[in-house]
Image: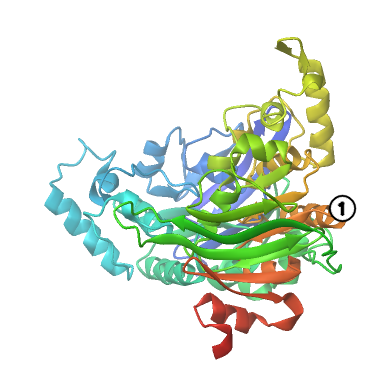
């Protein structure tokens, strides 16, 4: 007997001003299945699930749970119906312990003691193959551990439909494997899971069925066994241009743009002078060159980026720009020197989310005389400037007055690129530039990077994606425990050799 769906969303539509986020979407979820909701940035995946979780109200359409029509006006109502959602950006109180975060919102509905809560958390954690300490402070946890707390928090409420929004965007490969094992255990327990993603290999690995969205519409629902990467990519982007751009040009390498000489950075443990985040870092980047920095997360990449973007001061050493020492690396001076800075966390460090697209685009140039009339900003000129960049960088929706908080991740990244590259920089610091982006957005970002290289810019590419390092870099530097252990030409090594260096194997031992 054919299974009946436990969830049906029928003819769902949602509009934001002129933007049609969801258009007549029909979506079903069956018992004990992992259904992947696949699509590019801005395809409408998260909007659809926000409707299901009660964060948005659909403008049109109906929702059925086990053939009964329901109205979901809030997350509380969704939870009562057995629907839970773990968002891409976590909602945890970092100064509180795990158990406090898990029970937050259940009181006074449930009479709980700390011991009862901790016992239940340990039980759920063990069932999923995890080892979560209920009494740990959230501020002490890694990103992967925080995600586990978010999942336990939802399961603690007894849901039977679990929505995961881009759950692997911030995880290491090992953490992703651990998450997938846990999801399979949840399916065995009787849950159904909606897995929002844009990563083809992952959905093929974990999902039973894949629903592809593009521009707010369902393109197709397909059984995973009938799908492959090529088919899914064509569905996502709507044409055959699904490949990722690569760096085929030779580096210029004639003029030294950036040089670090014996740079040291004291670690965060102020009690110990011996703790160093960066140790004796020395390298150079030349005009028209992309230097890729490869390393496992937590080995000093973030601290190096913070130094080069004016967020932290070095303990020892010298940094040179075009052969002149820079004694004070602060954002104002870096803007004057035309250093473009694309941060790892675009929402936290790259944008002011409540401000409009236009306001974010002029953050670093608002004092430029061409944007002002005496003491006041010239909004007509700002609007014209913003519209020009919106068009050039294909920012969608093409509205200068909406807050960037309403944009997809890919379009947020385009806003940052547009703002920073307006400076016509000679040096570009890129940290995880395509993390969380779909194929189309990734291609766009890569094309922009390669164009800047061709113009003669020196680029430092910091990425935990080894494929990206090999696709874009001219030379590769490997960082391990705060040290650069080797710098090689891309064509002189393979991924296996770089991987061993990332694990701390010195070149002489390869």
The part of the image, by quadrant, that contains residue 380 is: top right
Residue 49 screen position, x and y as percent = 54, 46
Can residue 344 be spotted in the picture? Answer: no
Residue at the spot 55% in from the left edge and 82% down from the top edge: 500
Residue at the spot 74% in from the left edge and 41% down from the top edge: 338
The part of the image, by quadrant, that contains residue 446 is: bottom right
Which quadrant is the C terminus positioned in? bottom right
Determine whether 286 is above or below 41 in the image: below
Residue at the spot 82% in from the left edge and 57% down from the top edge: 453
Can residue 178 be spotted in the picture? Answer: yes
Residue 376 screen position, x and y as percent = 71, 11
Q: In this figure, which colouring scheme has been used for the structure?
A: rainbow
According to the picture, the residue beneath numbered tag 1 turns out to be 455
Determine whether 73 is above or below 299 in the image: above
113 and 345: which is toward the camera: 345
Lateral position of residue 164 relative to residue 284, left or right: left
Residue 18 screen position, x and y as percent = 74, 29
Residue 321 screen position, x and y as percent = 71, 50
The part of the image, by quadrant, that contains residue 200 is: bottom right
Lateral position of residue 450 relative to residue 336, left or right: right
Residue at the spot 69% in from the left edge and 37% down from the top edge: 335
- Mark 1 Cα within 10 Å, few/some/many (few <14, many 20+)? some
């Amino acid at each position: 007997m054919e299974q009946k769906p436990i969830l049906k969303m029928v003819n769902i539509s949602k509009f934001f001003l002129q933007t049609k986020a969801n258009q007549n979407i029909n979506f079903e979820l069956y018992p004990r299945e992992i259904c992947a909701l696949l699509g590019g940035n801005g395809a409408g995946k998260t909007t659809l699930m926000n409707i299901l979780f009660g964060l948005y109200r659909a403008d049109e359409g109906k929702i059925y749970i086990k053939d009964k029509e329901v109205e979901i006006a809030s997350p509380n109502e969704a939870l009562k119906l057995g629907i839970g959602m773990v968002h891409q950006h976590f909602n945890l109180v970092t100064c509180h312990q795990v158990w406090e975060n898990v029970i937050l919102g259940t009181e006074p509905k449930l009479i709980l003691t700390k011991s009862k809560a901790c016992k239940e958390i340990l039980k759920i954690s063990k069932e999923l193959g995890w080892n979560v300490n209920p009494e740990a402070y959230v501020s002490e946890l890694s990103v992967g551990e925080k995600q586990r707390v978010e999942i336990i928090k939802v399961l603690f409420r007894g849901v039977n439909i679990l929505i995961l929004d881009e759950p692997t965007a911030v995880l290491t490969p090992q953490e992703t494997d651990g998450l997938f094992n846990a999801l399979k255990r949840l399916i065995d327990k009787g849950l159904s899971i909606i897995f929002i993603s844009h990563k083809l290999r992952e959905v093929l690995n974990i999902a039973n069925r894949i629903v592809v969205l593009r521009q707010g519409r369902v393109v197709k629902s397909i059984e995973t066994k009938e799908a492959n990467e090529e088919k899914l990519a064509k569905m996502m982007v709507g044409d055959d241009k699904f490949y990722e751009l690569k760096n085929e040009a030779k580096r210029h390498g004639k003029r030294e743009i950036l040089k670090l000489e014996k740079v040291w950075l004291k670690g965060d443990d102020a009690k110990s002078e011996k703790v160093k985040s960066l140790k004796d870092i020395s390298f150079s980047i030349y005009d028209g060159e992309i230097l890729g920095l490869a390393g496992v997360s937590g080995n000093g990449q973030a601290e190096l980026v913070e130094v080069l973007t004016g967020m932290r001061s070095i303990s020892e050493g010298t940094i040179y720009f075009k052969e002149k020492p820079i004694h004070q690396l602060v954002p104002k001076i870096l803007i004057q020197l035309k250093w473009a800075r694309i941060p790892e966390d675009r929402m936290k460090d790259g944008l002011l989310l409540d401000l409009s697209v236009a306001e974010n685009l002029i953050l670093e140039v608002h004092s430029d005389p061409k944007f002002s009339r005496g003491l006041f900003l010239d909004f007509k000129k700002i609007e014209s400037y913003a519209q020009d960049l919106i068009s050039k960088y294909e920012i969608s929706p093409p509205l200068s007055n909406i807050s960037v908080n309403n944009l997809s991740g890919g379009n947020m990244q385009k806003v940052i690129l547009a703002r920073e590259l307006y400076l016509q920089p000679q040096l570009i610091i890129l940290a995880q530039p395509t993390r969380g982006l779909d194929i189309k957005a990734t291609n766009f970002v890569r094309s922009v990077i390669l164009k800047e290289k061709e113009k003669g810019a020196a680029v430092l590419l910091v990425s935990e994606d080894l494929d990206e390092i090999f696709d874009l870099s001219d030379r590769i530097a490997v960082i391990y425990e705060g040290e650069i252990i080797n710098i090689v030409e891309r064509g002189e090594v393979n991924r296996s050799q770089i991987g061993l260096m990332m694990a701390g194997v010195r070149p002489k031992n390869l």
